[in-house]
Image (cartoon, coloured by chain):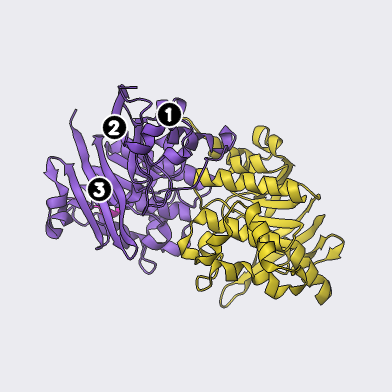
Amino acid sequence: MKPLLSFEHISCYFSTSFGELQAVRDVSLDLYEGEIFGLIGETGSGKSVLGLTALQLLPANARVTGEVRFENKSLLQLSEKEMRHVRGKKIALIPQNPASSLNPVLKIRTQLREAVRHQKELKDKDGYLASWLQAVSFSYPIKLLQSYPFQLSGGMKQRILTIMGAAGQPKLLIADEPTKGLDAPARHDVVEALRNVCRQTGTTLLVITHDLHVAQILCDRIGVMYAGRLVESNDTDSLFATPGHPYTEALLLARPTAGMKPMAGDSPNLLQVPSGCAFHPRCSYASEMCVEQLPPWTEYGQKKYARCFLHAPST
Amino acid sequence: MLQVHNVSKYIEYGLVRKRKKAIVNNTSFSIQAGETFGLIGESGSGKTTLSRMAIGLLRPDEGAVEFAGYDLYSASRGDSKLLRQKMQMIFQHPDTACNPRKTLLQSIMEPFVLHPTLRKGDDHEQIEEVMNMVGLQPELLRRYPYQVSGGQIQRIVLARALLMNPEFIVLDEPTSMLDVSVQAQILRLLKHIQKQRKMTYLFISHDLDVVNWMSDRVAVMKDGEIVETGTSNKIMKHPTHPYTQKLVQAFLYTDR
């Protein structure tokens, strides 16, 4: 099967007053059509930056090397004008922070219609939008179209943003922290909405989240990032049952249901990332080799990858 | 230790015709010394409003709050100053917890400015003690809030609260903005300090697993009222109120 989107050796640098900071380090990743892929990792691990790279939405002080391939086109070479035909139509973003992503002075209807403006053949746009609203379990879609963002709760706004991304019928949806700051019932609604949208239309979804619970119930495959590198990629069930990388293992043990065992040490400083495997100062399996060399990206089982010497062929 | 008697808080709204709506409606609960009392409920259910009334930050429209025998809202000035020292609060957002224009040292010194009686000899010795307690290097205090991580700020805020020698701390979603790995560190730290200093906690969160792990007893709030109270085990495993059942179900939901 051919991948829909591939990141090929993506690195991303930000120039800051403290020197150049490398947020993403040589990440290669394939997304296949129709799958839900989760990208997890802690704050500052580079997961959001990687997602935004595909849409060329990074701030001006960012420098990207590598290649993003989408339907056999190289996205990073496209001009701003050509990108405009990709954004929203081929690849749509569901942004972080629903509260500030909607325009407070425009009705939901006006804002949602913007998302379907390019679908010229569509006659009954309100009816089309209403059917989307129903698909994400809003009971009164017509009334909702007439309301303003301040009348809605955080979970509702997040579902509106989901539709805004999906209504343009893109091939790929990128959801950046879709459940951040939501309580359990709202989170449940948003996860359900994302899943319904993708399963009904066959849209591929890239979910960026730090909520392990959401990743577990929503995703088919999961990639784990640490200090800018992809350290593991695995299908969801085996990732949670038998994590391939020590970092994933430590992360899972820190969950409340697993007894809340804290991870040793502190998150790495991205300006001085540890040598070799960046996780070695916190890793209980670390050996001298981990300090000196970067472990190779190894396929150690069917569709199971990890960047750790525990799985490298020589050991 | 803390008793909340039938407190209510209303908001008035409407420009022409004034209408009243209860944010917290006739709610009572009590917290025993040394326990952790969890408060759960969805966004907008009044958890934060109730906890602010319980700690003396927001005067209830009806009802009273009693802490260690004192009525919080009719205590004399001297008494309430002492009470405020004994009760501390840790807020949800690490980004807004410290003044961005002050160094962390200046922020952590604030208790000494407000309560000079707390000064016992060498300030730096006292600060070093609380910083060790939360597991941070005192050198970190030379930095500004934007130069440290969210988890570190939450620890500094906790250290600042500990300087006051409190008996009761309200924790308003202290880890909801943090990563799982950091969350585990902070919550373990809170439990450790509770044991060491015999502290009482009111713990607010919408993460049911976290509340369950932290608390001895849990109260469930809905639309300004406490609908169910029980041991955390009972609430998670055998909820009786339909709303609690719905909440627990929405949280646990794992079917694919």
Chain corresponding to yellow in the figure: B
Chain corresponding to purple in the figure: A
Label 3 neighbourhood size at 10 Å, few (<14), some (14-19), many (20+)?
many
* Magenta stretch holds residue A125: yes
**Left or right, residue A17 beside residue B10:** left
**Left or right, residue B86 beside residue A224:** right
Magenta residues span A122-126
For residue A296, the mark is 2
- Residue B206: where, in percent of width, then height? 58, 48
Q: Which residue is mark 1?
A: A243
Between label 3 and label 1, give the one nearer the viewer.
3
Chain letter for the residue marked with disc 2 in the picture:
A
Between the residue at mark 1 and the residue at mark 2, the CA separation in whole angstroms equals: 17 Å
Label 1 neighbourhood size at 10 Å, few (<14), some (14-19), many (20+)?
many
Rendered image quadrant of residue B53: bottom right
Is residue B44 visible from the viewing direction of this image? no
Q: Earlier in the sequence, mark 1 or mark 2?
A: 1
Q: Identify residue type, mark 2.
A: Pro
Secondary structure under tag 2 reads loop
Secondary structure under tag 1 reads loop
Q: Earlier in the sequence, mark 3 or mark 1?
A: 3
**Left or right, residue B160 beside residue B79:** left
For residue A11, the mark is 3
Between label 1 and label 2, give the one nearer the viewer.
2
Q: Identify residue type, mark 1.
A: Pro
Q: Between B80 and A204, which is closer to the camera in this rendering?
A: B80
Q: Residue at x 29, y 25 (%)?
A: A299
